[in-house]
Amino acid sequence: MLRIENLTAEVDGKPILKGVTLEIPDGEVHAIMGPNGAGKSTLSYALAGREGYEITGGAVLLNGQDLLEMEPEERAAAGLFLAFQYPVELPGVGNANFLRTALNAIRRTRGEAEVDAMQFLKLARARMKELSMPEDMLKRGVNVGFSGGEKKRNEILQMALLQPKIAILDETDSGLDIDALKIVADGVNAMRGPAFSALVITHYQRLLNHIVPDRVHVLADGRIVTSGGPELAHRLEAEGYAGVLHEAA
Amino acid sequence: MPAVEETLDTVRDATQGAYKWGFETDIEMEFAPKGLNEDIVRFISAKKNEPQWLLDWRLRAFEVWKGMEEPRWPAVTYPPIDYQDAYYYAAPKKKDGPKSLDEVDPELLKTYAKLGIPLKEQAILAGVEGAGEVPADGARMPVAVDAVFDSVSVATTYRERLEKEGIIFCAISEAVQKHPELVRKYLGTVVPHTDNFFAALNSAVFTDGSFVYIPKGVRCPMELSTYFRINAKSTGQFERTLIIADEGATVSYLEGCTAPQRDENQLHAAVVELVALDDASIKYSTVQNWYPGDENGVGGIYNFVTKRAACRGKRSKVSWTQVETGSAITWKYPSCILQGEESVGEFYSVAITNNHQQADTGTKMIHLGKNTRSTIVSKGISAGKGQNTYRGLVRISPKASGARNFTQCDSLLIGDLCGAHTVPYIENRCMTAKVEHEATTSRIAEDQLFYCRQRGLSQEDAVGLIVNGFCREVLKELPMEFAVEAQKLLQISLEGSVG
């Protein structure tokens, strides 16, 4: 269970999150929607512990553990995964090497045995098949020369390998065509189960047709202004943020 | 690829940021008096029992040197060096050449152990009987070691096995005695005694170094290796290395360097000459981690080295690979003179400067023969207040029709107090030649680090991964044994440079 209590955060001294409260029980998928500048990306970076996103108040607990006390890598080991809106390129660093290094770093912290190269390849190949990723993507530099869709699928591959407790998907649908969108959604849906929960951040209803959320929250001006079931996303699509926000206010 | 994983593992037990090889061996030393004059040159030559022609050559070099000035063009700064305030000869006192382990100074063995010379090779270095046999299960490629301990090459291993192939691998002082005709034929023919200030100095006072001769058509069955080490206080080290690959011969040579921690700066002015005849191939790999000085820039080695290869024969090939992580100042341009038609020169370099280190390094590719080719891949990494300059020359003479060069210079900056500079000279006097130059400068971006950490990697591991990725094209040129050590060194050299 991820619990966010009255979280406030600022960037460059400017308050962005103004008291976010949210609970995502195990096994549930929640969506956060909201207009540009509402603080959606800030929320995901603040949860992952990125430098420059200063927490000024509130608490974040993952299964009772205080995430805010942890370094980014410790949060990752605790089971928090962030699928980046813009996955970063690492020239010269082989994708397979990166994925295995990450997997083993997390396994070590969890006290699990490391996987060797052969075990890893087997694991990675199986997952890649599910995501319709060509195998040569393992050999290429991390995200280097990947198309927008390939980058996003690579994020989902990492998620599938690292098996997080909670995944935050930051606008994973942006830049995806409908086929890629479906593959990515299938990847997330395949993870769904009692031990996995997700926070899907998106602008559009479109992704939520494929990943059907248990709850939908609307973030505006640094606060959750209204919450509801999947039907809320449909209403937003139909009426736009203005109508819904007006009603909430 | 799993090597990086190993890197991460190995580094975990390494000490934080400190120079691991900072120890000093307490052995009785034999010194020449301080200072430099003709008598010292004569003293060194006499100590080595050299023939007259070599003494004459040294004296000519000394005369030339006296009229020369230190080069001022490198982008490095350091206080003036007092050449009269140093010892030019220091040798561990010998007791008639140790033949068994008991006779070898245990301090010397300890030094080898700290350097990470494998135990078996230590025994061989110490001359223990039977130690030189290659293990039957030998999955590992044997490495022949010629250790230069200060000025004297203490022992040479695997010599017998090499002798069977007709390969000569010994100290250059020994080669002067046993193979004077070869030494005389090639010494100073690639780097003349008049070449530059430091090469002239080296020619006058060189004390030892390695000599390799690979006969016609022989492929050297093992990697040849030298461990250089500066130990005594205020001794300059002036090695002279000469490697000759005769027609159709192939050899891979590894050079590794460490020096104990010290406050005074120490001068290291080596000369390496390589000669490749028709169809011969020489691969020369260096991992240099001389003491770089402390985080305030106190101490450290001045590494002023002249390395040059003559690709004299048709289709000959010389490949330089260097990983330069140490030294307070590095001044070094391993070069190739591509004389033979279709000869090939390669230069792969990683240079790291952290804290107050300065490096001005690069290469010269001189295309003289037809259809000669050269490749330059240089990766400079600057951190702390380090200054890193790539300086390179590609010269294509009018006769070198069809010559080709490809140059790639990439710089990586860590932090905002360091500097990276690229100074490429291209002189093309041939219409049919092709010269390409690519250069990039980048930073380890905050988003790269955060991305790695979000995937569970620590900050240091993330830097290591990114830097190793940046250097991958060069590291893959290194022999396996060296590649792992080099990756480890890269990460250790950069510890504490981020965040």
Image (tube, rainbow, N blue to C red):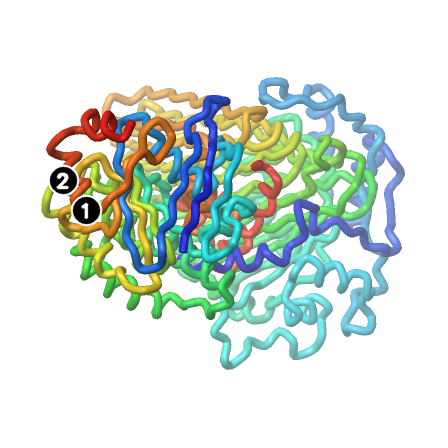
Residue with the most extreme bottom position: B136
Q: Secondary structure at mark 1?
A: loop
Q: Residue at x 68, y 57 (%)?
A: B115
**Is A234 on the left or on the right of B487, as rendered?**
left
Residue B311 appearing in the image: no
Residue A113 appearing in the image: yes
- Residue receiving disc 1: A230
Type of residue at label 1? Pro
Front-most of B457 and B242? B457
State the image coordinates of residue B428 (x, y, percent, origin top left): 34, 21
Type of residue at label 2? His
Q: In terms of image quadrants, where is residue A162?
A: bottom left
Front-most of B262 and A123? A123
| Location of residue A138 with respect to B498 vertically, above or below | below
State the image coordinates of residue A49 (x, y, percent, origin top left): 47, 41
| Location of residue B283 with respect to A128 vertically, above or below | above
Cα distance in 3D space between marks 2 and 1: 7 Å
- Residue receiving disc 2: A234
Label 2, residues with CA under 10 Å away: few <14, some 14-19, many ≥20: some
Query: Are the two marked residues, 2 and 1, in contact with CB atoms closer than 8 angstroms?
Result: yes
The answer to whether tags 2 and 1 share a subunit is yes
Quarter of the image where the C terminus of chain B is located: top right
